[in-house]
Image: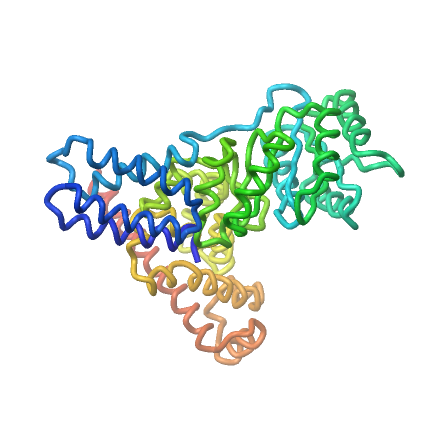
Amino acid sequence: MALFDKLSGALQKVFRDLRGYGKLNEKNVQDALREVRLALLEADVNFTVVKEFISRVREKALGADVLESVSPGQQFVKHVHDELVALLGGESREFDLKNRPATVMMIGLHGSGKTTTTAKLAARWKKSGRSVLLTACDIRRPAAVEQLRLLAAQVGVGILTPNPGETVPAIGARALQHARDNKIDVVIFDTGGRFQIDAELVAELKDLKSAVQPANVILVLDAAIGQESVHVAETFNKEVGVTGLILTKLDGDARGGAALSVRHVTGCPILMVGLGERPEDLEIFHPDRMASRILGMGDVVTLVERAQAAIDEKSAEEMQQKLLADDFTLEDFLDQLRQIKKLGPLENLLEMMPGAAQLPGHLRDSFGADAGREMKRTEAIIQSMTPAERRQPSLMNASRRRRVALGSGTQVRDVNELLKRFEMARDMAKRMKKQRKKLLRFGR
């Protein structure tokens, strides 16, 4: 289920109902707001936040001049959108990375995804050209240091680990000095967590903060725990002091109420959100884009940015040339699938498309999770072919098709369907090539 799916669906129904009115008045605004209020509460948004949000939308909806060129539904949507943007923080915020070394202290409870998020940040900053040092400050959890060591190796950054008997503040101070001596750009301190906040954890975090004076104290919150995440954020902010938030596991929570509550309740900006397990599934949080996605308006800007980052332009040009030259093979087809997979789960991409929220459920499934399963099946079938069969699909006789179906765990009809689609794609490319030649002749 997509992020904010339930809330988005409920709000879309409210907006559709409003389109039937000739103008906004107190009665239909109150009816709409009652439904919006219910939708927000069911999405697990904090009650106080809902109350204030509804009050501000009501004031705007009843106090604004009605534009003749804008329908009541559109005008109401704009009021809700504007207040959602304000609720989520107004504008995106960035980490404070001005100093060298920039210091980032990661805090959070067990299971929030803190250590994994630490590695994702390291990968992101390394990709931007910065040198990064991870510091293992979790000295109590079994295998915590080893987990961070493995993640550091995966993303290709350095790590500083504790010496026997070394205290957490001493580890932090040593890492900071090491970074200064070696001109490292960013130091990330991965601190210990607990299943709940206790005095010992707070004291340890305060001591580390005092020792390293971090420019960024980042609280990693599991969005799937709903209202409890708001309480956790309030407590950490009060006891330790937080400069920014990262919400993880938003892909696993169709309600999303924590994202709409925590910024308002704590006053701390949401810097990033985690939408998956891969290193690239950590996105900068843009309140305006998130508000548009919640209201079913899509998020084309993020979609384009993700495509630019994931798809190799040179490879795309080479693929186009192969298509026009009638030299497109199943190996190329497989490369295309892998390029698309880099963009992330298809159901997440779908919610970035304007109007996707208004599609019937069965169509959304066919473009989302169902399409993702189909891509995996296609990849398995092509990988079960020999290199010669991929380059020359005409070799695929009945016995070869049975062998490939068996090797890929699919049915012969699945292999037949794939080969049929591939031939259709090649035929379409041939028609495009002929049309292009005609246009070129006409141009002369």
Does residue 298 appear to the left or right of 390 in the view shown?
left
Does residue 212 appear to the left or right of 5 in the view shown?
right
Q: Is residue 252 above or below residue 441?
A: below
Residue appearing at x 89%, y 37% in the figure: 165
Q: Is residue 13 above or below residue 88?
A: below
Residue 22 rendering spot, x and y as whole percentages: 10, 45
Q: Quadrant of residue 442?
A: top left
Residue appearing at x 23%, y 43% in the figure: 441
In this rendered view, identify the residue nearer to me: 243 or 235: 235
Residue appearing at x 55%, y 32% in the figure: 244
Q: Quadrant of the C terminus?
A: top left
Residue 243 rendering spot, x and y as whole percentages: 57, 29
In this rendered view, identify the residue nearer to me: 133 or 235: 235
User: How many labels, in total?
Assistant: 0
In this rendered view, identify the residue nearer to me: 195 or 217: 195
Q: Quadrant of residue 101?
A: top right
Residue 312 rendering spot, x and y as whole percentages: 50, 42
Residue 49 rendering spot, x and y as whole percentages: 41, 40
Q: Quadrant of the N terminus?
A: bottom left
Residue appearing at x 57%, y 43% in the figure: 221
In this rendered view, identify the residue nearer to me: 265 or 298: 265
Does residue 272 appear to the left or right of 6 in the view shown?
right
Does residue 208 appear to the left or right of 350 in the view shown?
right
